[in-house]
Amino acid sequence: MPDRFATRRLIESLDPERDHQRIMRLSSGYEFPWDYVRSLEFALFKTYCVPSISRLLAKTGEFEHRPQKRYDDTALLMAELVDHGYDSPRGKEALRVVNRLHGRYDIDNEDMKYVLSTFVYEPIDWLDRFGWRPLTIQERLAAFHFYRAVGARMAITDIPSSYDAFRSFKRTYEQTRFVHSDTNRQIGQYTLDLFCSWYPVPHSWTAQAVLAMLDDRMLTAFGFTPPPRVLPRLAHHALRLRAKAVRHLPPRKTPRLTNDPGNRTYPGYPTGYRPSDLGAP
């Protein structure tokens, strides 16, 4: 049988600050590709609980008219940085697109910093609950160092210099900025409808399953009706059962990042595409 834990041992041999790009690619591309995608979907969902963020997104109209493309563009631009490295030619091209898109608007630095923090800690929190194995300290710190470097290249200022301080910032920000607004509900509903469109089951079933994954603070900020209390328990139990099954699968031999064939807007990406093709015109 292939050695299921060989990649973990390799990660444990690396330095989380010096080797953070390699660790991120190993962890998100080989060890936990499905979990990283799901956790980052909910990470982006979480940012829409902030009125200043949801107002800007409502103003652009992207979620109303092109929700799938907007989602795929965001996911792929971030995946480019992990898959190829933020200082690689493709990584630099992806960052130029991100900075060009953000440069069109007057975005508060604290909001940018918060969105960045969700990319670090939401996957960590998800994997602590639903991962097929515990994350190593190297993986946790590498995520912090990776996105701190990305944030610097996005001209985000005052990013905390330690893992714990950045998590503390995220926690305080959510406590003070998660409040209900009409645009939260608007963008949240567009996103919920997008998630529901991915599955061949009744919309109401998928909607309830998605809502079961949101905490009380998020439900309040969106103004969504909480699902029956049994649903979160069932959803979490199902994800833990999945983790037990994944633990016995052979290790992945090829990464699943930008080359995900399940991408809906750009199937088989990056064949025939460049990062500069992504994003709103």
Image: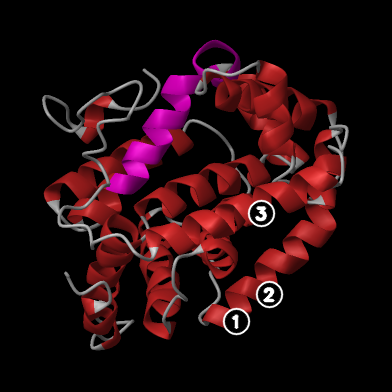
Give yes or no for contact between labels 3 and 2 (Cβ–Cβ under 8 Å): no
Give the spatial CA distance, label 1 vs label 3. 26 Å
**Is 230 in front, or is 198?**
230
Residue that extends furthest to the top in the rendered view of this protein = 65
**Is 186 in front, or is 201?**
201
Give the spatial CA distance, label 1 vs label 2. 6 Å
Range covered by the magenta-colored residues: 62-79
Amino acid type at mark 1: Asp
Give yes or no for contact between labels 1 and 2 (Cβ–Cβ under 8 Å): yes
Q: Where is residue 15 in the image (x, y as percent from the top left)?
A: 27, 86
Is residue 119 something one can see in this rendering? Answer: no
Crowding around mark 2 (Cα neighbors within 10 Å: few <14, some 14 to 19, many 20+) is few
Residue 8 is drawn in which quadrant? bottom left
Q: Mark 2 — residue?
A: 168
Q: Mark 1 — residue?
A: 164
**Is 238 in front, or is 184?**
238
Q: Position of residue 208 (x, y in %)?
A: 74, 31
Rendered view: 69 above or below 99: above
Q: Is mark 1 on a helix, strand or loop?
A: helix
Disc 3 versus disc 2: nearer the observer: 3
Amino acid type at mark 2: Ser
Q: Mark 3 — residue?
A: 236
Task: Find out whether residue 55 is within the magenta segment.
Answer: no
Amino acid type at mark 3: His
Disc 1 versus disc 3: nearer the observer: 3
Question: For the C terminus, which image quadrant?
Answer: top left
Q: Position of residue 201 (x, y in %)?
A: 59, 19
Rendered view: 51 above or below 192: below
